[in-house]
Image (cartoon, rainbow, N blue to C red):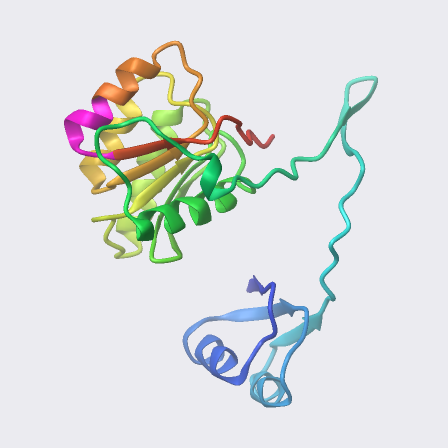
Amino acid sequence: GGIIAFNRELDAETAAQITANQFVELIIAPGATDAALAITAAKQNVRVLIVPLSNAHNQYDLKRVGGGLLVQTPDTLNVQLAQLKVVTQAQPSAEQLQDLLFAWRVAKYVKSNAIVFCRGGQTLGVGAGQMSRVDSTRIASIKAQNAGLSLAGSVVASDAFFPFRDGLDVLAEAGAKAVIQPGGSMRDAEVIAAADEHGIAMVYTGFRHFRH
């Protein structure tokens, strides 16, 4: 069964949509209305777990490695609109900028190499955990297509830079119109040129996520 987690209170309308259209066994939220709880209680095998939100961040991120621990500071950075650097001839629209910021937040939690297609505040396709960034791009596109989701006019977040132009060619073919990425590749000029060829707006964040 599925698990759905929210960072806001679960309301009756959302609970009704979930129980009517999806097979889910666990819903996690910081709160829920009485009406929402009544709806989920009427659905067999659906549990609601209330978990209060916390603003606290762990001081260290620990990972086990052979013979010891890798100790790192956690990835808590969030890019702000004013920090974005447009590097292409095409300028992103206000709506695209909001979607780019959203896609960037999603990419933060996807195992690298991470590619995320979004549109209208919705995640459409995710490519994760590949050794090749272009393969992650293809996988994200295929997943959206398999779900019957159009990528026309979508935006794309890449958790680290594109090392070659091939990733841009693939996402352009899928229908993406804007990209957010850290920048910093030796072939940045080649990648920017590819974006310009396809009429894609591209912005740099100046830092990467790269989750492993």
Q: Answer with left or right where residue 64 lies relative to residue 15.
A: right
Residue 60 location, x and y as percent? Answer: 79, 34
Name the quadrant containing residue 180.
Answer: top left
- Is 94 rendered above or below residue 40? above
* Residue nearest the viewer, comparing 169 with 182: 182
Q: Residue at x 45, y 49 (%)?
A: 102
Residue depicted at 23% across the width and 48% down the height? 153
| Residue at x 24%, y 31% (from the top left corner) | 170
The answer to whether residue 6 shows anywhere in this view is yes
Q: Quadrant of residue 29?
A: bottom right
* Number of numbered markers: 0
SS majority, magenta: helix
Residue 19 falls within the magenta-colored stretch = no
Say left or right for 29 vs 56: left
Placement of the N terminus among the 4 image quadrants:
bottom right
Residue, far top: 186
Q: Nearer the viewer, residue 62 or 7?
A: 7
Q: Residue at x 62, y 69 (%)?
A: 26
Q: Is residue 120 above or below residue 162?
A: below
Q: Which residues are magenta?
A: 194-200
Please determine whether, in this image, residue 37 is positioned above or below residue 58: below
Residue 167: x and y in percent read 30, 26
